[in-house]
Image (tube, helix red, strand yellow):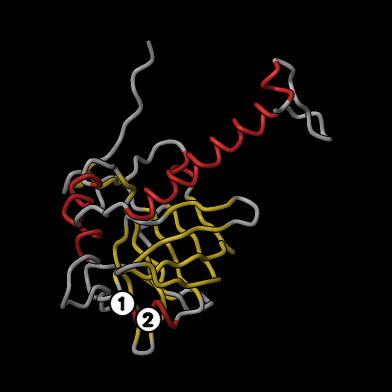
Amino acid sequence: MTLDTLGVEAFDARGATVADHRGAAVIVDRRETAAADIRSAAVVEPAALRRAFRRHAAGVTVVTMAGPRGPVGFTATSVASLSADPPLLSLSLSATSSCAPALLAAPSLVVHLLSDGQEGLAARFATSGIDRFAEPTRWRPLPTGEPLLVDASVWLRTRILSRLSAGDHHLVIAEVVETQVESDAEASTAPLVYHNGSYGTVTPRASG
């Protein structure tokens, strides 16, 4: 017979009651069960994931880098600010993309944040089988060698820190070493976004 069966609370050396230990055991057991459930849960089909993310509006960028046979670039909606200190961003690219070998080899890249009205530029860098840097694309090499799209009002030059194979994509983390924002872009230029299969933009709501 224990003290708690006589109506007296039993305490351990730290002052915890028997009831405390029993409650903690129940919580741990529930957590372990939940963890086992999530590990064994089936994942959704790729089509279901795509259908969900069609509802997510994303900023449109063009990523460029120097390749072994000339400039390389692709349109991306996966670019995200990752850290402010140190300044990091992340992006991903399909492992089957024609740009993947260049991305895996390049030491640096430039991310161009596109503005409303630059749908043509975004579509061009998303089209396969063409010279994306031919006219009407306007570009020049930076002193460090990366191709710069001169019509982009905002761009960030980065050095690649790490690459990770994640599912059917390559995930890249890069450190920002230089940025350029045109003075009028800070206040007046609306961004180009991609949502539900179409390009668009966002505008501030009227106050009041």
Q: Does the residue at mark 2 contact the one at mark 1 (Cβ under 8 Å)?
A: yes
| Location of residue 3 with respect to 135 vertically, above or below | above
Q: Name the residue under label 1.
A: 99
In the image, what residue occupies the spot 34% across and 89% down?
69
Choose top left, top right, bottom left or bottom right for residue 164: bottom left
Q: Mark 2 points at which residue?
A: 102
| Location of residue 88 with respect to 136 vertically, above or below | above
Q: Which type of secondary structure does the marked residue at label 1 adopt?
A: loop
Side (left or right) of 53 relative to 13: left
- Front-most of residues 125 and 55: 55
Side (left or right) of 2 relative to 198: right
- Front-most of residues 56 and 116: 56
Mark 2 Cα shell of 10 Å, populated few (<14), some (14-19), many (≥20): some
> Separation of disc 2 and disc 1 at Cα?
5 Å
Coordinates of residue 159 in the picture (x, y in percent): 54, 71
Side (left or right) of 107 relative to 67: right
Mark 1 Cα shell of 10 Å, populated few (<14), some (14-19), many (≥20): some
Circle 1: residue type: Cys
Coordinates of residue 40 in the picture (x, y in percent): 34, 55
Circle 2: residue type: Ala
In the image, what residue occupies the spot 51% across and 42% down?
29
Choose top left, top right, bottom left or bottom right for residue 92: bottom left
Choose top left, top right, bottom left or bottom right for residue 19: top right
**Quadrant (top left/top right/bottom left/bottom right) for the N terminus:** top right
Can you name the residue that lies furthest to the right here? 13
- Name the mark on residue 181: none
- Front-most of residues 1 and 9: 1
In the image, what residue occupies the spot 57% across and 64% down?
175
